[in-house]
Image (cartoon, grey):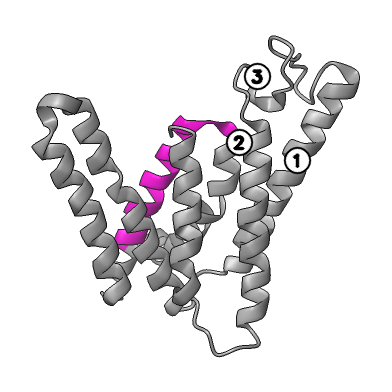
Amino acid sequence: MFWKNNSLNLVQLSFYFLPVSLLIGSLVVNVNILIFIILTSFFLLKNKISIKFNLTNKLLLSFFFLIILSSLLNINVIGVENLIKSILLLKFFFIYIFVETLIINKKLNLEIFFKICLISVIFVSLDVILQFFSGKNILGFEPHDGRIAGIFRSEAIAGALIQKLFIFSLIGFFSIKYLKSSKIKYHEILFFLIATLGAFVASNRM
């Protein structure tokens, strides 16, 4: 009964929590992604919601398989660890097709997601500003080696996060606004948005 009544809420919660998890750390991000994939898999199966493999999905899947195949053929050069990493990149494919399926079936609200992204950016921005002027951020952390890192302590990624997540969320937010007044479908821009987020996560070695 609990699963039947709350499964969608749990799926939505794990998805909307993704921007916040980026602020906490790579471990939380990866755990949250895994939870989202597992919860969504069960939800789709339970509700008999099928995934439609369009041309974009097939091309994206082929792209990831090529990366894995290339890693496998060069395993003597790159090592087993990098092969495993290439296989784990499939998580971005699952995120994409699951989010696409949930949106098509009106189970997710991307506008809420992008608002959370913007709020996260504002929080990080205010945090680093506070650390710059007062010498300590909201958690009492001081600059590391003269670098303003805010809540990231010794990791100087606050600037990159603000820049990339802000652009991602801003484009996404206004795209949703535009989609509401046009004939363009959600999944036609979703690929670009998820790819942007994937590039950001990869660039920060998550």
Which residues lie in the magenta part? 24-42
- In the rendered image, the quadrant that contains the C terminus is top left
In the image, taking residue 19 as reference, residue 14 lies left or right, namely left
The residue that label 1 is drawn on is: 123
Give amino acid for label 3.
Answer: Arg
Name which quarter of the figure residue 45 lies in: bottom left
SS at circle 3: loop
Mark 2, secondary structure of its residue: helix
Residue 50 quadrant:
bottom left
Q: Is residue 131 magenta?
A: no
Report, in whole angstroms, how far the alpha carbon at label 2 lies from the one at label 3: 11 Å
**SS class, disc 1:** helix
| Comes first in the chain, label 2 or label 1 | 2
| Three-letter code for the amino acid on which mark 2 is drawn | Leu
Picture disc at residue 23: 2
Identity of the residue drawn at 64% across and 57% down: 169
| Furthest-right residue in this view | 133
What's the mark number on residue 72? none
The kind of residue tagged 1 is Phe
The Cα–Cα distance between marks 1 and 3, rounded to whole angstroms, is 15 Å
